[in-house]
Amino acid sequence: MRYYADSEGGDYIEDPTHADLVALVRALNREENTFFIVFPDDDDLQWSIAVLTRRGGLGGYEIERSDSRTGETSTVPAADPVAIATEVQAWAETTAAIQNTP
């Protein structure tokens, strides 16, 4: 499955590796690069997973998942860039595999 990551700060990565996703998380800040989103590389698939900086004084990040096929929408707090990258990659691959099943 192919997918890509697109950040508010202008980074665009096709088929990001785990290391690419960790770097994207670490590059987030509260001024000009507050989020990145991973989308499938197929317009017929309607899912996304985003990582955003948390608002307020709490710091850290939030992971937002959205899958229009299943109606799933969820937001969870997160802190560790490596764990976030693992979650993003696993969810994107699992969701893409499910949506590619007839």
Image (tube, rainbow, N blue to C red):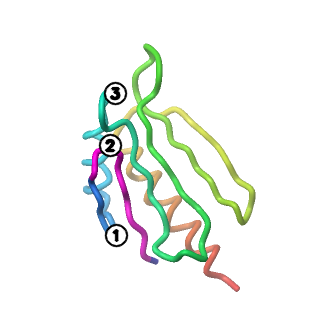
Q: Nearer the viewer, mark 3 or mark 2?
A: 3
Q: Which mark, by number, is residue 34?
A: none
| Residue for point 36% across, 56% down | 6
Q: Nearer the viewer, residue 37 or 1?
A: 37
Q: Earlier in the sequence, mark 1 or mark 3?
A: 1
Q: Is residue 46 left or right of residue 78?
A: right
Q: CA distance from mark 1 to mark 3?
A: 26 Å
Q: How many marks are shown on the rendered structure?
A: 3
Is disc 3 in contact with disc 2, using a CB cutoff of under 8 Å?
A: no
Magenta residues, start to end:
2-10
Which residue is situated farthest in the bottom direction here? 102
Q: Which mark, by number, is residue 30?
A: 3
Residue carrying label 2: 25
Q: Nearer the viewer, mark 1 or mark 3?
A: 3
Q: CA distance from mark 3 to mark 2?
A: 12 Å
Q: Which mark, by number, is residue 15?
A: 1
Q: In the rendered structure, does residue 7 fall within the stretch colored magenta?
A: yes
Where's the C terminus, which quadrant?
bottom right
Position in image of residue 51 (x %, y %): 44, 43
| Residue for point 30% across, 60% down | 12
Q: Earlier in the sequence, mark 2 or mark 1?
A: 1
Q: Amino acid at mark 3?
A: Arg
Q: Amino acid at mark 2?
A: Val
